[in-house]
Amino acid sequence: MSQIQGKIKVLGETKEYGAKGFLKREIVITTSDEKYPQHILIEFVQDKTSLVDAYNLGDEIKVSINIQGRSWDSPQGETKYFNSLQAWKIEGVTQAKQEDNFPDDEGDMPWD
C-alpha cells in the first residue's frame, strides 16, 4: 500500500468500457512537497469511482493506492509493460489554520 498527497488538477468523468460495464474514472493530482511538482494520474475503478464525487478541483487530498503492472505482447512480437495506480481510498487533507495573535476588535488594543 502506498499513499500520494496533492491537489486535484483534473477530475475526469466516470466512463463505461466494454459490454460487461467496466467503470473507470481518472483524476490527476499535483504533488507539492517536491522541488519539481509531479502530475500523477490515478485510476478509480468499479465501485470506487464514486469516492471522488465529494471532491472538487484544487482540493488537497491523500489517496491510498495499489501499484499494478501488466504486460502486453504486440502483433510484432514485442512485449510492452504498463503500470497503473489504482485508488481504493481517498480523504481530504485539512490545512491547519494559522491564528494570529491580534484581537479582532479595534477597541481591544491596550492603547485605545
Image (tube, grey):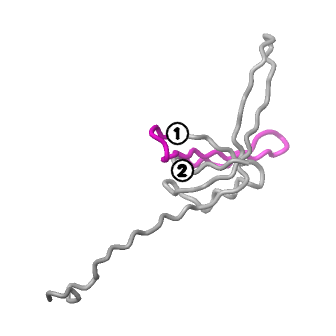
> In x, y percent, where is residue 93?
55, 61
Choose between 51 and 29: the one closer to the eye.
Answer: 29
Direction from residue 22 to residue 30 in the image, left or right: left
> Residue 16 is drawn in which quadrant?
top right
Residue 96 pos. (x, y %): 47, 67
Question: Which residue position holds label 1?
Answer: 38
Q: Residue 6 carries which label?
A: 2
In the image, the segment drawn in magenta is: 10-37
In the rendered structure, are the residues bearing label 1 and label 2 in contact, judged by CB atoms less than 8 Å apart?
yes
Q: Residue, x 76% and y 40% (percent of image)?
A: 17
**Horizontal and vertical percent position of residue 55:** 58, 59
- Using the rendered view, name the quadrant where residue 52 is placed: bottom right
Give the alpha-carbon distance from disc 1 to disc 2, as whole Å. Answer: 9 Å
- Mark 2 Cα shell of 10 Å, populated few (<14), some (14-19), many (≥20): many
On screen, residue 31 above or below 75: below
Query: Which residue is depicted at the point 76% across and 33% down?
Result: 69
Residue at the outermost right position? 20
Looking at the image, which residue is at 77% across and 55% down? 47
